Image (cartoon, rainbow, N blue to C red):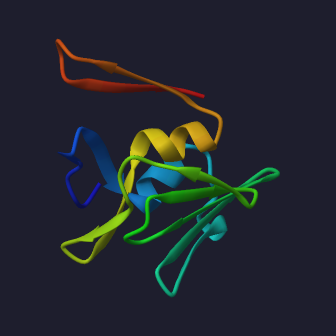
């Protein structure tokens, strides 16, 4: 990655493109327009709006505990929320401060 992930308000943030690609979203299925990020994978459409704590999965709204945001000019997404929306299992190891994902 060209920017480092960070933890804010107890959530790990990563840049949108790296989150999406790690979850199997093809680069041509990553969209950004007017502050809205859209990720398409199979029959799932995930949308996040910068500054909003609402995640939409196929149009259904899910309230996240943190918003997507811009940091140093990059769109950063709360990893767990996006990963779970795209079918991944996410775990946190407190002892090693490590996030693990299983697709």
**Residue 67 x/y as whole percent:** 37, 59
Q: Depth check: 83 or 49 in front?
A: 49
* Above or below for 60 versus 29: above
* Above or below for 69 versus 9: below
Q: Depth check: 8 or 98 in front?
A: 8
What is the residue that sits farthest to the top in this orientation?
95
**Residue 94 x/y as whole percent:** 21, 16
| Left or right position of 72 against 49 | left
Q: Image point 66% across, 66% down: which residue?
A: 29
What is the residue that sits farthest to the bottom in this orientation?
34
Q: Quadrant of the N terminus?
A: bottom left
Rendered image quadrant of residue 72: bottom left
Rendered image quadrant of residue 16: bottom left
**Residue 56 x/y as whole percent:** 63, 58
Q: Image point 52% across, 47% down: which residue?
A: 82
Rendered image quadrant of residue 28: bottom right
Q: Image point 56% across, 56% down: which residue?
A: 55
Q: Image point 60% across, 28% down: which residue?
A: 103
**Residue 97 x/y as whole percent:** 19, 23
């Amino acid at each position: 990655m060209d920017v480092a992930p960070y933890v804010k308000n107890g959530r790990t943030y990563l840049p949108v493109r790296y989150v999406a690609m790690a979850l199997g979203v093809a680069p041509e299925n990553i969209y950004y327009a007017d502050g809205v990020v859209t990720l398409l994978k199979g029959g799932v459409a995930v949308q996040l709006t910068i500054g909003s704590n609402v995640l939409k999965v196929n149009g259904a709204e899910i309230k996240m505990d943190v918003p997507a945001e811009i940091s140093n000019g990059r769109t950063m997404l709360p990893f767990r929320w996006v990963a779970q929306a795209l079918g991944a299992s996410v775990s946190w190891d407190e002892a090693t401060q490590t996030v693990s994902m299983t697709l």
